């Protein structure tokens, strides 16, 4: 079985090709999460946690402009998930706006930060015409990957403090 931390280490190594600040954001995300993910595999909720680690790295990158990812607080990261009176689907445009403000085109396939975002913005919701049986499938992914993943990574069971 593939270990979750092995996948995350690969993603962190790929971040070396990114802009300044991208690698340190990944380093910080793994510093926070790795102690809690020892032995986890890429089964059941492993892929969700992988998305959560990537979303945390992206959030740290976007929020750390000029100060470094260690200066970013949990409250700031959680603030990126605030619906601001809307729905989960109103959150992604704000992240894309922050990406653009940081000099990234979300559709640029050569940009490692944008490539990460494109994986994270995938909506895992079932189609509207899906049977209600999907509602009871506990292994079903729901909603945008970055939201689901980041909520899972920041869950109380991990006790991540920053």
Image (cartoon, helix red, strand yellow):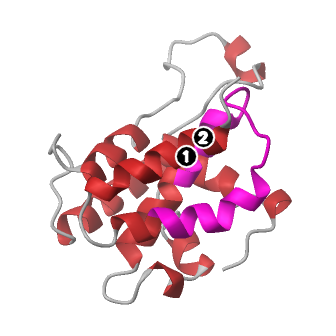
Report the disc number at residue 56.
none
Does residue 115 appear to the left or right of 144 in the view shown? left
Rendering coords of residue 51 (x, y %) = 54, 44
Residue 6 numbered tag: 2
Q: Which of 120 and 37 is in front in this view?
A: 37
Residue 121 as seen in the image, left or right of residue 109: right
Image height of 59 relative to 96, above or below: below
Q: In which quarter of the image is the C terminus?
A: bottom right
Residue 130 x, y percent position in the rendering: 57, 12
User: Crowdedness of circle 2 by 10 Å Cα count: few (<14), some, many (20+)?
Assistant: few
**Which quadrant does the N terminus fall into?**
top right
Q: Is residue 110 visible?
A: yes
The correct choice, above or below, for 46 with respect to 29 in the image is above
Q: Which range is magenta?
A: 26-53
Is 68 positioned to the left or the right of 41 in the image? left
- Say whether residue 87 is visible: no
Q: Percent from the top left, x then y, of residue 128?
A: 50, 20
Q: Residue at x 59, y 47 (%)?
A: 149
Majority secondary structure in the magenta region? helix
Secondary structure type for disc 2: helix
The answer to whether residue 82 is magenta is no
Q: Is residue 133 left or right of residue 114?
A: right
In percent of the image, x 78 and y 57: which residue is there?
36
Q: According to the image, label 1 marks what residue?
A: 8
Q: State the image coordinates of residue 133 (x, y, percent, origin top left).
A: 72, 12
């Amino acid at each position: 079985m593939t270990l979750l931390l092995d996948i995350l280490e690969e993603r962190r190594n790929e971040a070396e090709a990114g802009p300044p600040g991208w690698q340190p954001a990944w380093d910080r995300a793994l510093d926070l999460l790795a102690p809690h993910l020892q032995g986890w595999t890429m089964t059941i909720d492993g892929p969700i946690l992988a998305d959560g680690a990537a979303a945390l790295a992206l959030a740290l990158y976007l929020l750390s402009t000029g100060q470094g990812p260690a200066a970013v607080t949990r409250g700031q990261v959680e603030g990126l998930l605030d619906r601001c009176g809307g729905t989960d689907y109103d959150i992604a445009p704000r992240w894309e706006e922050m990406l653009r403000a940081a000099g990234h085109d979300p559709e640029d396939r050569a940009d490692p930060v944008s490539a990460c975002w494109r994986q994270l913005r995938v909506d895992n919701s079932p189609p509207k015409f899906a049977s209600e049986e999907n509602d009871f499938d506990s292994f079903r992914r729901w909603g945008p990957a970055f939201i689901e993943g980041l909520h899972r990574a920041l869950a109380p069971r991990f006790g991540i403090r920053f």
